């Protein structure tokens, strides 16, 4: 990547905070949308089953369009591509609450997911480039900032819902505010362009490179465990362990909080122990958590278990994106490949858990989650990449320590 020549320590610190702001704005859109799903369901007059069908379309839209992101990134440059795609994503928040029926909602959620996925690829690619130039891990904390944004968006949405605010007005105001915040944040990110060395631009629709498939498989395991725990942990405590609704909901909170905190603190752990060792230890923690859930039928054990699953898988996806970007000459294309696989995992996890539970039981379903968590221990080696040293400033050639594989 070429482009910006000012890579002084002060400029890189500013770029890091800027890209963190981008991740936060991106997450806030998701949080804002999620809290108003009941309003959207009532407005479009949907049953639980038809709502479930509609909610599959964001993941479908993202998975089908993320391969386009590499071409957009190449053509516009990293900063401009991120500015355009992030603005499209924040403004797409307006659409779902306007949908009057199922088929309109499916279409707008496809668009919503497409803009989410392409902006996700753009910001992760630029996050990895910023990490490379800093010479230390930042991807975990960037994803932690996404979680912070999601919490902020959901908190604001909860207030709006309790106040009885019309979701169309709420999402219009939120979309405009987040678009402005995103544009301000993007101004500070690195301005980079792909250095092709005279080679042709990537195709308009680039399939994931082979290097991304094994890395994506690790992300698949982590996102499957994440989706299953977020969507089914409360049901598990209520139906399997017979707890009340308040305690059941606490399991989702425990899982989300441990993930957010682990991501915010994860960079120091990765810099100290390396990506492979960190993911292996995370796999051990997640496996131990899964075993607690399925073998010790007590609410306290289940709450602890879901917390351990969240702690164990928290840094896997950020590290998978970073490893993908360093696996070949086209970072955005590789990230798009990994993101496509992980989005697919997020799409199928809730329904797969439900299907297994219908055929057997929820205990068996979370046995599957435990097995996938165990796979992280064995598969962590695919995250071992050649260390990438920071790109030095022209005025200062003293390179920081390289990122550990």
Image (cartoon, helix red, strand yellow):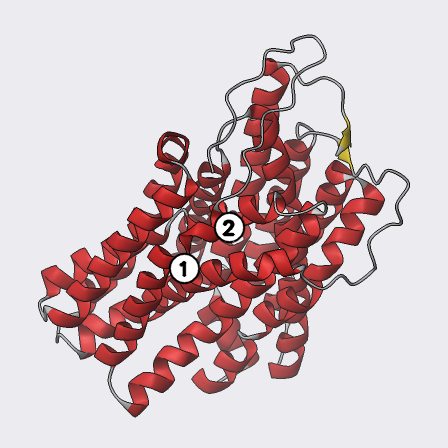
Quarter of the picture holding the N terminus: top right
As drawn, 48 above or below 390: below
Residue under label 1, please give it: 222
Q: Quadrant of residue 65?
A: bottom right
- 81 vs 285, nearest the viewer: 285
- Inter-mark Cα distance, 2 to 1: 10 Å
What residue is rendered at 43% in x and 47% in y? 147
What residue is rendered at 49% in x and 63% in y? 217
What residue is rendered at 23% in x and 73% in y? 236
Q: Can residue 93 be seen here? A: no
- 68 vs 371, nearest the viewer: 371
Q: Residue 320 carries which label?
A: 2
Q: In which quarter of the image is residue 296?
A: bottom left
Q: Where is residue 344 in the image (x, y as percent from the top left)?
A: 54, 69
Category of crowding for the residue at label 2, using alpha-carbon neighbours closer than 10 angstroms: few (below 14), some (14–19), many (at least 20)? many
Q: Tell me, yes or no, whether the two marked residues, 2 and 1, touch with CB atoms within 8 Å.
A: yes
**Callout 2: helix, strand or loop?**
helix
Q: Quadrant of residue 100?
A: bottom right
Left or right of 288 in this view: 193: right
Residue reaching furthest top? 395
């Amino acid at each position: 990547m070429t482009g910006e020549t000012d890579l002084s320590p002060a400029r890189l610190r500013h770029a890091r905070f800027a890209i963190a702001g981008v991740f936060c704005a991106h997450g806030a859109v998701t949080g804002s949308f999620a809290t108003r799903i009941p309003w959207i369901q009532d407005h479009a007059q949907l049953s639980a089953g038809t709502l479930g069908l509609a909610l599959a379309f964001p993941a479908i839209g993202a998975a089908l369009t993320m391969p386009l992101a590499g071409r957009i990134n190449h053509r516009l440059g990293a900063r401009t591509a991120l500015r355009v795609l992030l603005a499209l994503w924040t403004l797409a928040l307006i659409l779902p609450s306007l949908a009057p029926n199922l088929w309109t909602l499916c279409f707008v959620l496809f668009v919503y997911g497409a803009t989410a996925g392409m902006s996700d690829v753009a910001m992760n690619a630029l996050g990895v480039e910023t990490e490379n130039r800093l010479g230390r891990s930042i991807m975990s904390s960037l994803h932690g900032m996404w979680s912070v944004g999601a919490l902020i968006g959901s908190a604001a949405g909860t207030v709006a819902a309790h106040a009885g605010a019309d979701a169309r007005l709420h999402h219009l105001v939120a979309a405009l505010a987040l678009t402005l915040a995103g544009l301000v944040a993007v101004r500070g990110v690195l301005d980079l362009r792909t250095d092709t060395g005279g080679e042709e631009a990537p195709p308009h629709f680039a399939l994931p490179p082979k290097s991304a498939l094994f890395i994506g498989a690790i992300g698949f395991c982590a996102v499957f465990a994440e989706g299953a725990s977020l969507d089914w942990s409360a049901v598990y405590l209520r139906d399997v362990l017979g707890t009340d609704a308040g305690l059941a909901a606490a399991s989702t909170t425990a899982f989300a909080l441990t993930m957010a905190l682990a991501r915010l603190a994860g960079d120091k752990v990765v810099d100290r122990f390396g990506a492979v060792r960190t993911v292996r230890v995370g796999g051990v923690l997640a496996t131990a958590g899964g075993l607690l859930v399925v073998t010790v039928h007590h609410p306290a054990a289940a709450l602890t278990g879901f917390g351990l699953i969240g702690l164990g898988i928290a840094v896997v996806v950020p590290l998978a994106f970073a490893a993908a970007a360093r696996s070949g000459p086209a970072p955005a294309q590789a990230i798009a490949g990994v993101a496509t696989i992980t989005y697919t995992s997020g799409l199928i996890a809730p329904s797969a858990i439900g299907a297994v539970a219908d055929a057997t039981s929820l205990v068996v379903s979370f046995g599957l989650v435990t097995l996938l968590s165990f796979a992280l221990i064995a598969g962590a080696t695919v995250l071992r990449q050649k260390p990438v040293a920071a790109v030095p400033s022209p005025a200062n050639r003293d390179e920081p320590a390289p990122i550990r594989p």
